Amino acid sequence: MNTSPARDAVVRRHQVNVVGEGSQTLVLAHGFGCDQTVWRFMVPLLQSRYRLVLFDFVGSGGSDLSAYDPQRHANLEGYAQDLAQICTALGLEAPVFVGHSASSMIGALASVADSGLFSRLVMIGPSPCYINQPPAYVGGFEHTDIVGLLDMMDHNYIGWAEAMAPVIMKNDDRPDLGQELAQNFCRMDADIARRWARAIFLADHRERLPRVSVPTLILQCADDALAPVSVGRYMQACMPGSTLREMRATGHCPHMSEPEETVALLDDYLTGARP
């Protein structure tokens, strides 16, 4: 990779790290309230065969908080622009994008804006819209549910994080995972977290789905409190060239709770799928 002031600025801004070997590059994008450390369970399983790009979205982890722009980052399109800048700065040529939760849609938006940016998308627990839109769409929440969730974040962000993390993780027999997720939430700048949550939970990106032209793998967990099975099936029906795999893993974070299954499905798709 060439070194330049512009490239170095992007690398510092997003705390970019590149690890692993292999001719194929995976760009790993964390979800809301987390940072690149959530991939620590999968990295050892991937790095001998893939080149991995890890980074933090602005406001998360070791990113430069001063780079947060309330106007630019008021919607997921701003984060998609950041993602494209990372790929450009590193000189990546059509890598595979792997995104968790909200980052799945960030990757989709970046791909719609530039269809050559990624060769494939892998979406873990995605949702284009969290609010039910009857009768055709079941997103899992009523509008009043989302408003209540956002109000709780406004009034007691730490309490929200501690209450929601085990619900989102859903592996009651492994409370350490829920605690780790809560700690991730609490490390994020609370004001930025509240704004990012609004950009995620109040958005409706369903009309973008048919415009995603690259092959896409949708990984749908069982008993996911944020993205029910109906969402994964809706997305598969709307996205040409998409593949849906319903997982044995439960909860919303299989990259943490079931990394072996997640990697196995990823490997199977990348070695067996054809555009």
Image (cartoon, grey):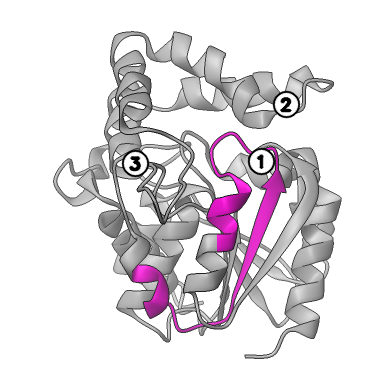
Q: Is residue 58 visible?
A: yes
Q: Residues within 10 Å of mark 1 (few under 14, many from 20)?
A: many
Residue 253 circle label? 1
Callout in the foreground (2, 3): 2
Q: CA distance from mark 2 to mark 1?
A: 9 Å
Q: Position of residue 111 (x, y in %)?
A: 40, 75
Left or right: 232 as drawn, with respect to 84: right
Q: Look at the numbered disc 1 and give the secondary structure of its residue.
A: loop
Left or right: 23 as drawn, with respect to 263: left
Q: Look at the numbered disc 3 and give the secondary structure of its residue.
A: loop
Q: Amino acid at mark 2?
A: Leu
Q: CA distance from mark 1 to mark 3?
A: 25 Å
Q: CA distance from mark 2 to mark 3?
A: 27 Å
Res. 74 image quadrant: top left
Per the image, the residue denoted by label 2 is 177
Position of 2 relative to 176 (above/below): below
Residue 196 circle label? none
Q: Amino acid at mark 3?
A: Asp
Q: Nearer the viewer, residue 221 or 95?
A: 221
Q: Look at the numbered disc 2 and give the secondary structure of its residue.
A: helix
Res. 190 image quadrant: top left
Position of 22 relative to 33 (above/below): below
Q: Residues within 10 Å of mark 2 (few under 14, many from 20)?
A: some
Please name the residue shown 73% across and 57% down the image: 246
Q: Do the residues bearing badges 2 and 1 touch, measured as CB atoms within 8 Å?
A: yes
